[in-house]
Amino acid sequence: MQHVENLIIGAGVSGLATAAALGSADYMVLEADAEIGGYCKTVKRDGFVWDYSGHFFHFKHPEIERWLVERMAGQEIRVVKRRSFIDYNGVRLDFPFQKNIHQLPQADFIECLYDVYFAAEAAARGKIAVPDNFKDMLYARFGRGICDKFLVPYNEKLYACDLSRLDKDAMGRFFPHANVSEIVRNMREPDNAGYNQTFTYPAGGAIEYVKALASALAPDRISTQERLLAVDLDGKIARTSKRELKYTRLISSAPFPRFVELTGLDHDPAVFSWNKVLVFNLGFDRKGPDDVHWMYYPSREVAFYRVGFYDNIFASDRMSLYVEVGLAADAPVDSAALRARVLSDLRKVSVVREQRLVAEHSVVMDPAYVHITQDSNREVARLRARLAAASVYSIGRYGGWTYCSIEDNIVEARSLVQNLGAAR
């Protein structure tokens, strides 16, 4: 039986970053798919460059950005100031909604301002119970107007679930909080900065970052089309679709509930839930709106929750979109019917006017957004501790069953390797 010191499951960003951090140490990366990259794959068709979904890097660690860029020789890389808007019943607002309610029609603005003011007053006087779920947190912090007009319908479309199921901190630092003072100040002194105020994107698509990570690995240390089938935690043996491997430690970025199932650990699968996202990448013969990177759609009359504009990153002369439709995990996917509705809705919201569709691609991301709940947090913490005691570590957005950025995955992978003292 072959032995490997560090067995890595998944050749997405987390797995490749782990292997890169290991340096010359003994490792093997197993990937079930035929190609590396996970969800960071890029499709090139008829002159259009699309990712499986929009994968943009928001670097907070300059040393990580430098490390990647040094391995992308000849690649044009744009650092772009984000331009994001909300389509509210045909009115374009700056994102985030809660800081730009002054851009609403007057009656809607007054309603939102009134509700957020008195929600803050009630909270300050202790008249509102401390919320324990995401939906109650939104109403307690922002009041009914802001929540009913944007925060609740938009996030229900994104997560495809009742928001009261989610933990109040389900989005962590990625949720754009704002208090009354910030909302009022924004009326005269706009400040819509968030965690992703700028983003970085290479001309060749997100796969270029994957290639940069992979360039630090020996090619013979990556095995594609090799699926993990079972893990013997006591014997430290992984059984795959091709062989059995003895390992010293195992690092997995596979979706946490699926991975735990393969280990045989006692667990409660009912605490884990998620949604899936159907992504349509669409190329048109002519430009559309030229001043936007993301447009958000809270209306339940529109199928998609977000549209991204690739063509406005590199100022290309044809409109290139990715369009995201949130679906429940168990919902059937009728791509043809949804494609027809998406194209109709794009015309309804005036993204598409006279343009002609000339290229397209679609993909289902499953899981897409994990549902972070109090129960899932407890079960993840318990099971990760059990796994760590057996020298098994589950990391990344799906391996950690969390909400994080792509850069966070690299940071976590490097930190794990350092803490384990596994690099050479």
Image (cartoon, rainbow, N blue to C red):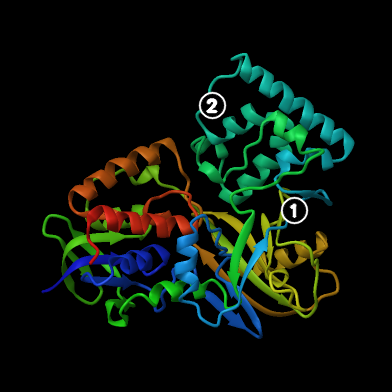
Q: Which numbered disc, 2 or 1, marks the residue that appears first in the sequence?
A: 1
Q: In the current view of this chain or complex, which residue is farthest to the right? A: 106
Q: Quadrant of the N terminus?
A: bottom left
Residue under the image location 49 percent in, 69 percent down: 40
Tell me where residue 233 appears, x and y as whole percent.
17, 56
Residue under the image location 46 percent in, 43 percent down: 372
Real-space CA distance between mark 2 and mark 1, rounded to the nearest whole angstrom: 29 Å
Numbered label tally: 2
- Side of 340 where 424 appears, left or right: left
Residue toward you, 178 or 295: 178
Q: Please determine whether, in this image, residue 121 is positioned above or below residue 36.
A: above
Residue 271 in sight: yes
- Side of 201 where 165 appears, left or right: left
| Residue tagged 1 | 85
Residue under the image location 38 percent in, 51 percent down: 400
Q: Please determine whether, in this image, residue 251 is positioned above or below residue 177.
A: below
Tell me where residue 87 appears, x and y as whole percent.
78, 52
Q: Considering the numbered disc 2 on the image, is that residue within a helix, a strand or a loop?
A: loop
* Amino acid at dot 1: Phe
